[in-house]
């Protein structure tokens, strides 16, 4: 009987380890998919990221950019100020 008990105990331990591995893998997959979806949604909604406060402002003087900006924005750029108007 002692050999049968060891076999049953080993099978129970192996089964619980296998079940735990499957549950862990499923939970990891769900959290990874959720995190990827959250990251995708966050990056797609942010059209223009706000630069850090300590980075120097550099004006975009290309012709295509200049054609689309307002006079107020151009005045702010010429003054060396980070534009606050579109």
Image (cartoon, rainbow, N blue to C red):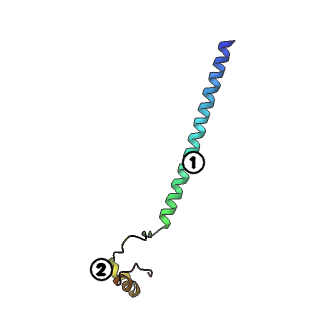
> Where residue 78 sits: x, y (%)?
34, 84
For residue 8, the mark is none
Residue under the image location 52 percent in, 61 percent down: 41
> How many C-alpha atoms fall within 10 Å of the one at disc 1: few (<14), some, or many (≥20)?
few
> How many C-alpha atoms fall within 10 Å of the one at disc 2: few (<14), some, or many (≥20)?
few
| Above or below 32: residue 79 | below
Q: Image quarter for residue 68?
A: bottom left
> What whole-number distance in Å separates the C-alpha atoms at marks 2 and 1?
47 Å
Q: Nearer the viewer, residue 44 or 74?
A: 74
Q: Quadrant of the C terminus?
A: bottom left
Give the labeled residue for mark 1.
30
Mark 2 in CB contact with mark 1 (< 8 angstroms): no
Identify the residue at the far front of this view. Answer: 54
Residue under the image location 65 percent in, 13 percent down: 3
| Above or below 38: residue 79 | below
Q: Image quarter for residue 14?
A: top right
Give the labeled residue for mark 2.
63
Helix, strand or loop status at disc 1: helix
| Above or below 54: residue 5 | above
Helix, strand or loop status at disc 2: helix
Q: Nearer the viewer, residue 31 or 55?
A: 55
Residue under the image location 53 percent in, 56 percent down: 37
Residue under the image location 50 percent in, 58 percent down: 39
Q: Image quarter for residue 50?
A: bottom left
Query: In the image, 61: left or right of 1?
Result: left
Query: In the image, 31: left or right of 46?
Result: right
> Where residue 74 sits: x, y (%)?
36, 84
Q: Earlier in the sequence, mark 2 or mark 1?
A: 1
């Amino acid at each position: 009987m002692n050999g049968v008990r060891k076999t049953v105990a080993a099978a129970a331990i192996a089964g619980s380890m296998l079940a735990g591995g499957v549950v862990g893998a499923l939970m990891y997959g769900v959290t990874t998919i959720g995190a990827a979806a959250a990251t995708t949604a966050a990056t797609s909604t942010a059209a223009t990221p706000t630069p850090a406060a300590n980075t120097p402002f550099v004006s975009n003087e290309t012709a295509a950019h200049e054609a689309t900006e307002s006079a107020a924005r151009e005045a702010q750029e010429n003054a060396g100020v980070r534009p606050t108007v579109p």
